[in-house]
Structures are given as structure tokens and as C-alpha cells.
Image (tube, rainbow, N blue to C red):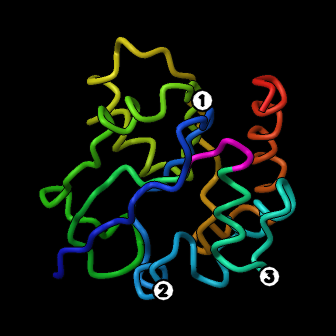
Amino acid sequence: MPQIQSFPPIGNPTAKILILGSMPGKESLRAGQYYAHPRNAFWAIMGDLLGAAPTLSYEARTKMLKSANIALWDVLASCTRHSSMDADIDADSISLNDFTSFFLKHPGITEVFFNGGMAEQCFRRHVQPLLEHRPLHYQRLPSTSPANASMSYAQKLKAWEAILYCSRRKGV
């Protein structure tokens, strides 16, 4: 299986919210963009919540995330995986992103949202113990992946509205 690499984080030093995935899928890796699979609901949800719709250029969408003080990254820096499915990640191949440095560069982040269960599981198991001194609020949201077909788009969107509530509470 090939070793795959995640992307650098998207965000600015004033970010208050961090959205974490696990590892980009094959379509995202080919495109060099987060959530590039056309059936992944992430950008449609960001469009409904923030105006960062998939019809905009990738640069415009990421700029809108930054202006909303939202950072975007993945828990894993690299791994081996033969498909785009999180379940196919070889646990022995996992390498984590450097969250210590990330949080030093983004001191205002207090809210961490996980895009699905694998991102949460890897973060809580491998990263959270290193950040015990940092007060963070965590919330898992339903995966925006097309593999998460058990929820409708409307149900996913409703759950992801937590980001808006958090933004308003933080005065973002």
C-alpha cells in the first residue's frame, strides 16, 4: 500500500475553531484540495453555513473559512491506505500531525470539531493526552463523506450548525 500524506492546515493565527478530518481521500489527494470528492457534503454544508459553496473556487472557499476564524486540518500527517475509507487505514502506519506547534501558532482555538468518528478516535487516543494543559471543547459531527449514507444531507447540515452556534458564542 502506498504511504499517503495529508495537506498543510488551512487557517490563520486568529482562528477560534478547528475542524479536523482523518486523512484526505483519493479524490482530494489527486486534486490537492480538502474534501474534493463531488459527493462529499463538506463544502455544500460550508456553503449553507458560511457561503463557502462548492461552486466557488477552492481559494475563495478557504478564504471564507479563514475569515470566519475556522481552521481546517487532518489528524494524520501520513498513513497507508488502499482506498479512501478510514476503515482501511493501516493503524501501524499512522503518523500524526504536529498539534503542539499548530496550537502555538493558533492560540485562540478553543473549539475542536471532528468530521466523523475516525478523526475523533485518533485525536483523542494520540493527541489529546499531549494537550492536557490546553482547555479545549470537543464535539464530533457526522462525517460529510459519501460513505456516511445513513444520514440525509438535511440531518448532517442540522448537526453541523453547531459550528455557527459556537462562532456566535465566541463572537467570531
Query: Closest to the observer: 150 or 5?
Result: 5
75 sits to left or right of 13? left
Q: Secondary structure at mark 2?
A: helix
The residue beneath circle 2 is 31
Which residue bears the numbered disc 1? 111
Q: Is 11 on the left or on the right of 166, as rendered? A: left
User: Which amino acid type corresponds to the residue marked 3 in the rendered image?
Assistant: Thr
Q: Where is residue 70 drawn, in percent x and y?
A: 64, 45
Decide which of tag 1 and tag 2 comes sooner along the chain.
2
Residue 54 appears in the figure: yes
Residue at 12 percent of width and 57 percent of height: 92
Q: Identify the element where label 3 is drawn.
A: loop
- Residue stretch in magenta: 67-71
Name the side, left or right, on which 122 lies relative to 39: left
Count of marks overlaid on the render: 3
Tell me the number on the disc at residue 55.
3
* Residue 154 visible: no
> If the image is split into quadrants, where does the C terminus sit?
top right
